[in-house]
């Protein structure tokens, strides 16, 4: 007999939340964040399984200058001078160096706001603790 997967209460809640947000905000793209632990397989010889760990509406932006195309959430990079200095044009970074602290943070946040942030339904996928098997069919 085959074993069936029985979602946990948390998985049901997360799935219902995903379906509700997709239904309420049909104009938004759905983006899946997959934790690197889920797909880490240097040999790339296996399939993988993950579980929804969070669902929410977020503003995301993808860096274009690194190999991995790192994805950032807007709320995580506000006032983040390292982020701004990494992605801003050199001319802007040079101008910021001569500003007082208040103007500096205003300038970097203006740059951060100017990026092409995408409002989306973000689904985080993490590594399951175990495979929740149910009754055999």
Image: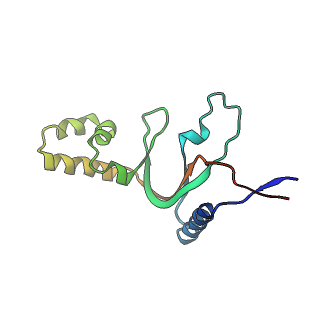
Position of residue 20 relative to residue 72, above or below, is: below
Looking at the picture, tell me which residue is in the foreground, 129 or 25. 129
Which coloring applies here?
A: rainbow
Q: Position of residue 29 (x, y in %)?
A: 54, 58
Q: Residue furthest right?
A: 1
Looking at the picture, tell me which residue is in the foreground, 18 or 4. 4
Residue found at x 59% / y 62%: 10
Residue found at x 14% / y 50%: 102
Left/right of residue 92 with respect to residue 27 in the rendered view: left
Q: Position of residue 14 (x, y in %)?
A: 57, 62
Looking at the picture, tell me which residue is in the foreground, 87 or 5. 5
Residue 94, by quadrant, is top left
Q: Position of residue 15 (x, y in %)?
A: 61, 63
Looking at the picture, tell me which residue is in the foreground, 77 or 16. 16
For the image, the number of numbered tags is: 0
Q: Position of residue 77 (x, y in %)?
A: 33, 48
Residue found at x 54% / y 44%: 35
Residue 59, by quadrant, is bottom left
> What is the quadrant of the C terminus in the image?
bottom right
């Amino acid at each position: 007999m085959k074993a069936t997967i029985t979602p946990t209460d948390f998985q049901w809640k997360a799935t219902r939340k995903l379906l509700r947000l997709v239904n309420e905000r049909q104009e938004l793209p759905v983006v899946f964040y997959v934790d690197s632990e889920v797909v880490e397989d240097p040999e790339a010889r296996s399939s993988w399984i993950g579980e929804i760990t969070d669902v929410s509406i977020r503003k995301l932006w993808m860096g274009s200058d690194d190999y991995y195309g790192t994805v950032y959430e807007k709320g995580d990079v506000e006032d983040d001078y390292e982020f701004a200095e990494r992605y801003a044009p050199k001319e802007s970074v040079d101008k910021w160096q001569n500003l007082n602290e208040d103007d500096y943070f205003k300038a970097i946040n203006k740059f951060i706001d100017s990026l092409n942030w995408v409002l989306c339904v973000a689904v985080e996928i993490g590594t399951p603790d175990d495979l929740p098997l149910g009754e055999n069919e």
